[in-house]
Image (cartoon, grey):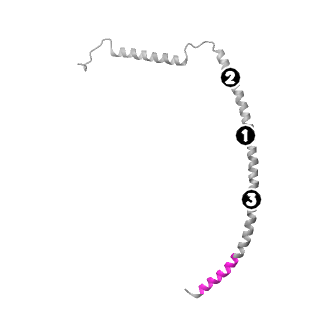
Amino acid sequence: MRKGPLCLMLVTLSIVAPAHGEETTPLSLSAGSQITELQQRLKESERQREELGKQLQNADGERESAQLARLRQENQRLKLQLKEVQAGSSIPRLLTDQQQWFVIGAGVALLALLCGIFASGASRKRRQWLN
């Protein structure tokens, strides 16, 4: 290697190193002040977050109480409508829902039996495969 570029590199490093060392001292002081400032901002933000959380809980409570009151009113209205409809239908039901399904099933079974009888024919023929 040539002596010229080596000397140039050593001179450059000797100039840059002290300049770099001088910059670190103010940076550490400014970093300390930034840290304290950021800690203060963090405390303030946490305080604001707690206040907003309390406000949100209060707003939620008010909204839920309004919804609850509205739902109670609607429930009362629906109960009154149900009573009116039940009072209006004075015809008693003959069968319950379960009994109605039983009757429908019996009717389907009877219909299937009749279709089977008519489909096989009136006379009972001997099947050819039953020798």
Q: Image point 74% across, 60% down: which residue? A: 38
Look at discs 3 and 1 and give the one toward the viewer.
3
Judge the density around disc 3: few (<14), some (14-19), many (≥20) Cα neighbours within 10 Å. Answer: few
| Quarter placement of the N terminus | bottom right
Q: Position of residue 53 (x, y in %)?
A: 73, 46
Element carrying mark 2:
helix
| Magenta residue check for 5 | yes
Instruction: Please give the residue where the numbered disc 3 appears in the rendered image.
Output: 39
Q: Image point 54% across, 19% down: which residue? A: 97
Q: Position of residue 7 (x, y in %)?
A: 61, 86
Specify the amino acid type for callout 2. Lys
Q: Image point 75% across, 62% down: which residue? A: 36
In the rendered image of this protein, does residue 82 appear above or below residue 64?
A: above
Q: What is the spatial separation of the Cα atoms under label 2 and label 3, in whole angstroms?
A: 59 Å
Quadrant in which residue 2 is drawn: bottom right
Q: Position of residue 127 (x, y in %)?
A: 27, 18
Numbered badge on residue 60 = 1
Q: Are marks 2 and 1 in contact (CB under 8 Å)?
A: no
Quadrant in which residue 114 is drawn: top left
Residue 62 as seen in the image, left or right of residue 107? right
Q: Nearer the viewer, residue 79 or 30?
A: 30
Specify the amino acid type for callout 3. Gln
Numbered badge on residue 98 = none
Look at discs 2 and 3 and give the one toward the viewer.
3
In the rendered image of this protein, does residue 115 appear above or below residue 47?
A: above
Q: Earlier in the sequence, mark 2 or mark 3?
A: 3
Q: Nearer the viewer, residue 10 or 39?
A: 39
Q: Image point 70% across, 76% down: which residue? A: 21
Q: Which residues are magenta?
A: 4-20
Numbered badge on residue 79 = 2
